[in-house]
Image (cartoon, rainbow, N blue to C red):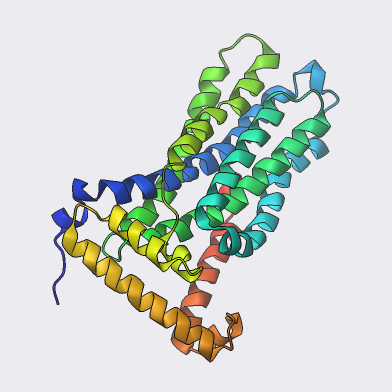
Amino acid sequence: MNIPSISSIHSFRLYHLYAAAGSAAFFGFIFGFESGIITNASFYMQHDEAMQPINQTFLYILMIIAPGSAAIASLLAAPISDHFGRKKAIISAIVCDTIGALLCSLSLNKQMLIVGRIIIGFALGFGSSVVPVYISEISSPHCRGFLLTSFQMFITFGLASANIVAGISSHVECIYAKWRLMLSFTTLPTLIQFFVFLFMPESPRWLCANDQQDEGIRVTQWLHRNDEKLQQEEIDRLNIYIGYKERLKEMLGGGWRVMHLTRDMHALQQILLGCMLQIFQQLSAINAIM
């Protein structure tokens, strides 16, 4: 078995692939920042006369409204991204987060602030569900783990940046401006990601799954254009995927049925393991600490 060397896997020759995966993974920074900044901002809201009266109940609602919205959005992410594409779904999440951040930072009352956090939560749940799918679909098996890990790395970096921005903003004398600066900061990275990601390609697997095989192969060639051997390997995998998709559709009567996947015990074990890891990660209450 011919296994590529580490140097060839992480070579700068694959800069197109790294650019596409990195620009998508950067959404993790937005996710981490939005998750961490609200706790710091809420402290200064309590001293802003324009937002009075603020009680503990309102602060609890402010904290949980975004995760609640994110949970709903995550359920909608799969069917919407399957229909419209991974790229459009990620761009929609970026736009929603920008709108939500602007609403929060320019809030004239508490109701406007809540609406902004709902939109942000929807963006975070939607984007965090689609980004890993996009990265896994554009990357080769040799570097998929490395690229997917970058999404989690950006989340951690975003959480740390939220505290740094909060610390800097705390030195602003105007109470009215402190928390608004904190909540508005994220508009800068979202705008940068928006314009960069516009130039990134759609997932080749999504293209093939939607009867755009020629475009899917062209995108695969672009992603691996400086490594001919890896490029051919990925095209071969894509052709295998196309054939498998057609056979699966015939077997399932023209549609995809999730229940059929659970008949394979090996696949079922992988699904359950992934679900349990996500469940116990949330039950650990680490988000409350951060």
Q: Quadrant of residue 279?
A: bottom right
- Percent position of residue 12, x then y: 20, 46
Q: Nearer the viewer, residue 41 or 28?
A: 28
The correct choice, above or below, for 276 with respect to 182 in the image is below
The correct choice, above or below, for 71 with respect to 208 in the image is above
The residue that appears at 65% across and 41% down in the rendered structure is 120
The residue that appears at 63% across and 18% down in the rendered structure is 178
- The residue most toward the top is 173
* Left or right placement of residue 124 versus residue 142 in this view: right
Q: How many marks?
A: 0
The correct choice, above or below, for 133 with respect to 1 in the image is above
| Quarter of the image that includes the C terminus | top right
- Percent position of residue 230, x then y: 21, 63
Q: Nearer the viewer, residue 234 or 37?
A: 234
- The residue most toward the front is 214
Q: Is residue 63 visible?
A: no
* Left or right placement of residue 284 versus residue 224 in this view: right
| Quarter of the image that includes the N terminus | bottom left
* Left or right placement of residue 7 versus residue 75 in this view: left
The residue that appears at 56% across and 87% down in the rendered structure is 260
- Percent position of residue 253, x then y: 59, 89
- Percent position of residue 228, x then y: 18, 60
The residue that appears at 86% across and 25% down in the rendered structure is 53
Q: Nearer the viewer, residue 65 or 189?
A: 189
Q: Quadrant of residue 236?
A: bottom left
Q: Is residue 119 visible?
A: yes
